[in-house]
Image: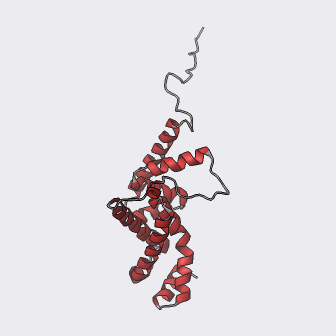
Amino acid sequence: MTDDALVRRCLSGDPTAMRTLVERFQADVFALSVRILHHRQDAEDATQEVFVRVFRSLHHWDASRPLRPWIQTIAVNRCRTWLGKRSKQPQPVEHLNLIPDRPESAPPSELVQGIAAAVEELRADYREVFVLFHEQGQSYEEIAMVLDRPVGTVKTWLHRARNQVLETLRQAGLVPQEPTTSDRQTPEPTRSR
């Protein structure tokens, strides 16, 4: 069923369509929320709030645009609001985890852990772009729609985010340092006879 048909059925009050819409987009919204909020329980709560807002605003969705970026825009905005509220309240120790919960059956390698930690250190807008591009597989155009920013800004933020992640990995010794000019081998000039 197309997104447009699904939305029409949801707007008519079809509970099966509503369940289908949630099932279609829930994993993406939850994954995005975990990466932004850094806390699984907060992400679960935020995901529920996202879908409440989606159903409340579904009649505003423009059928000429893709549904997924529209829902992700709501998710990003909800997570930003959640972070704003959380920063104003005292936090229990469990909120200080920098890396979200991972399945215990597949422990990540040292490099993967380093990348995850480096991404968590990014400023919020860089992290959002990085996660949407590398983890959610969104195009520049889709990210621009989700974040309501020009495509050029998205590209710039992604470039800066990648450079910061790389620099963090270099400082941690997880990837080799870039050779300096003095380290590079310069070929001997050829002498003519």
Q: Residue furthest front?
A: 92
Going 48% across and 91% down the picture, which residue do you hit?
Answer: 13
Task: Name the quadrant containing residue 128.
Answer: bottom left
Observer-nearest of 110 and 63: 110
Q: Relative to 154, is 16 above or below? A: below
Tell me if I can see residue 148 in this picture: no
Give how far across and how far down residue 87 sits, in percent.
Answer: 34, 59
Going 57% across and 22% down the picture, which residue do you hit?
Answer: 185
Q: Residue furthest left?
A: 88
Q: Quadrant of the C terminus?
A: top right
Give how far across and how far down residue 33 sits, in percent.
Answer: 47, 64
Give how far across and how far down residue 167 sits, in percent.
Answer: 48, 39
Observer-nearest of 173 and 144: 173
Horizontal relation, residue 66 to residue 191: left or right: left
Q: Quadrant of the N terminus?
A: bottom right
Task: Name the quadrant containing residue 111.
Answer: top right
The type of colouring in the image is: secondary structure
Going 49% across and 83% down the picture, which residue do you hit?
Answer: 7
Going 46% across and 68% down the picture, which residue do you hit?
Answer: 72
Q: Relative to 61, is 28 above or below? A: above
Q: Residue furthest right?
A: 105
